[in-house]
Amino acid sequence: MLEVSGLSVSYGLHRALEDVSLGVGAAEIVVILGANGAGKTTLLKAVANTVPAEPGRCVVLGGRDVSELPAHLLVEEGLALVPEGRGIFGELTVRENLLLGAYPKRARAGEAATLERVLALFPRLSERLGQTARTMSGGEQQMVAIGRALMSNPTVLLLDEPSLGLSPLMSGELFAALGRVRETGIGVLLVEQNARRSLAIADRAYLIETGRIVGEGPAARLRDDPAVRRAYLGEA
Ligand code: ATP
């Protein structure tokens, strides 16, 4: 569904990403694990083309080479990014925030049906459609942000640290919702600090260190790998 190869990004003289290649299939959750500053956010932004990558990369989405497309056209192709910090509009209602997500042409015609699907994925939002977004809890705001991205009718969803700052209970609800998103056939590329929870839900994982992919595999295997447990799950 999404195939990325040869992705490198530099900020001035600092090489933040070095020749990264990865893939996300339909109905698959893929998690990127790495320490602070490893390049995880940069990776998502470079895939979504909101930071410039170096020449030579290849991004294929649904079989189409989209390497040269600007960010807004990638949304039309079915790629949706939920940035860290959510970026929802606090003064607008939940419904208004969600409907803003349906701006791409690919989403407009099916807007009402997509809204129904999003509310089925996040039942908590259907009770709060008229509520001003800034008065929602952190976890609910994250659901609004993900719901808004889903309103663009994506085939691949990129999520940057969705559980950041959420209570364990709310994180659990969020990860359960991501499982339901996967059941709809959408591919999810997830950046997470919460390695334990994300490895529990993901199908596959990539490990990133100082801008390079240093490991990858089925999440179930990485969960049991002693080196991964020490480095990412905080075990002695
Ligand atoms: P975190 O988990 O702390 O958010 P991360 O793995 O997402 O970290 P990035 O935010 O991608 O890491 O940053 C990777 C590296 O690039 C870091 O060393 C960071 O300081 C640097 N960097 C990120 N954005 C910029 C920028 N706009 N200008 C200069 N350097 C940047």
Image: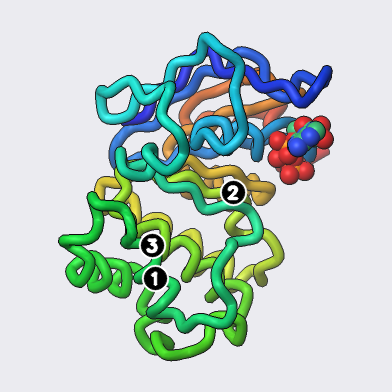
Residue 23 screen position, x and y as percent: 42, 25
Labels in figure, total: 3
Which residue is found at the position 48% from the left and 44% from the top?
158
User: Dot 1: within a 10 Å radius of its alpha carbon, few (fewer than 14), some, or many (20 or more) residues?
Assistant: many
Residue 22 screen position, x and y as percent: 48, 23
Residue 85 screen position, x and y as percent: 65, 60
Q: Is residue 112 left or right of residue 44?
A: left
Q: Is residue 40 visible?
A: yes
Q: To which residue does mark 1 refer?
A: 98
User: Dot 2: within a 10 Å radius of its alpha carbon, few (fewer than 14), some, or many (20 or more) residues?
Assistant: many
Residue 17 screen position, x and y as percent: 68, 22
Q: Are marks 3 and 1 in contact (CB under 8 Å)?
A: yes
On residue 160, which mark appears? 2
Which amino acid does the dot numbered 1 rest on?
Answer: Leu
On residue 107, which mark appears? none
Nearer to the camera, 23 or 179:
23
Quadrant for ligand 1 reads: top right
Which residue is found at the position 63% from the left and 28% from the top?
207
Q: Nearer the viewer, mark 1 or mark 2?
A: 1
